[in-house]
Image: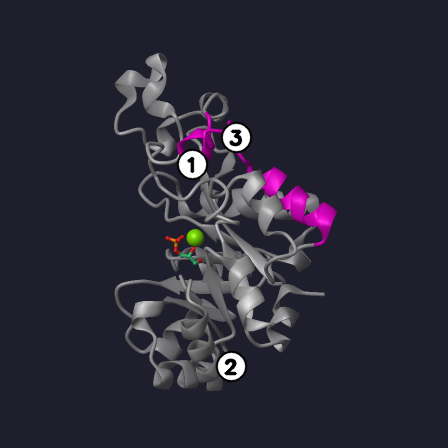
Amino acid sequence: MNFLKLFNNTGLIAAHRGARSIAPENTLSALKKCAGHCDFMEIDVQLSSDGVAVIMHDDTLERTTNVQEIEAFKSRKPYLLSDFTFEELSTLDYGSWFNKEYESLLTLHDALKFIKDNNLYMNVEIKDMHGVFDDKQAVSTVLKEIEKLQVEELVIISSFRHEYLPMCKRMMPNIPTAALVEDEQPKDLIEHLKRLHVDSYNLDDVLVDEQTVQMVREAGFFVNVYTVNDSVRAKELFDMGVNGVFSDVSKIMIEELRA
Ligand code: G3P
Ligand code: MG
């Protein structure tokens, strides 16, 4: 089944960065914990300095690794992920900041292998890496991993950097895509989405209004909203016609909404 078939159902709950309320975000533990407790999972991908696709949200390593404690990295402030090689990133601990337990770096390859082995669905968000990596390199590195593992049917690709999205469609037309927005909605929204050839419009909850949701749905696009941790709000959004919400507490939301 292609990822988009999920949207035949309403009220989808996506695990935002895995089960990030109970496990360190964007790690294999977070993916294992949300499996079975969400309709699909979401991860953030970016590239190491030597071009390996790794899973992390922030563009710096400070918040979610022990980089500041490592003597050899003391001079590497502001600890931009894109300044570190894959080998260097592999020496860091991605779990202790959250629950004192060591967690290794998650690569895109291992995240995709996990969904393949367990037949799960995943939203792969490509972080905005412009200015560091050429758009084509960013997109093709991610797509190559998807192609290598043959998980085209299990994924959707999203990005705040809209330039990536038509490139994805051109390179691998079978993979669905979503345009992410925060702060403000694009002018001429429907025309913009059409130009990008995306399947879905994924917006911040603060930007949502019923009229926009209806207009986007009527134009044939799916709508997903982040980040929603309250079941009452999720229900309101679903009643407006929103297809899915990204939540840090997907297990609780599913229990409350599908009781
Ligand atoms: O894809 C939804 C959400 O993950 C977008 O925001 O900053 O958490 O990646 P962010
Ligand atoms: Mg994300």
Three-letter residue code for mark 2: Gly
Q: From the viewer's perspective, is 220 left or right of 61? A: right
Residue at disc 2, CB closer than 8 Å to ligand 1: no
Q: From the viewer's perspective, is 172 left or right of 85? A: right
Are the two marked residues, 2 and 3, in contact with CB atoms closer than 8 angstroms? Answer: no
Three-letter residue code for mark 1: Phe
Are the two marked residues, 1 and 3, in contact with CB atoms closer than 8 angstroms? Answer: yes
Q: Earlier in the sequence, mark 1 or mark 2?
A: 1
Mark 1 or 2: the one toward you: 1
Q: Which residue is mark 3?
A: 103
Q: Which residue is mark 1?
A: 98
Q: Earlier in the sequence, mark 1 or mark 3?
A: 1
Task: Find residue 185 and report its horizontal and vertical position in percent.
Answer: 30, 71
Question: Crowding near pointer 3: few (<14 within 10 Å), some, many (20+)?
Answer: many
Q: How is the image coloured?
A: one colour
Q: Which residue is mark 2?
A: 220
Task: Find residue 136 and report its horizontal and vertical position in percent.
Answer: 46, 47
Marks 1 and 2, how far apart at CA: 40 Å
Q: Earlier in the sequence, mark 2 or mark 3?
A: 3
The residue segment tinted magenta is 93-119
Regarding residue 156, the answer to whether it shows in the image is no
Q: Quadrant of residue 108?
A: top right
Mark 2 or 3: the one toward you: 3
In this rendering, is residue 18 above or below 98? below
Q: Considering the numbered disc 1 on the image, is that residue within a helix, a strand or a loop? A: helix
Are the two marked residues, 1 and 2, in contact with CB atoms closer than 8 angstroms? Answer: no
Residue 142: in magenta span: no
Three-letter residue code for mark 3: Glu
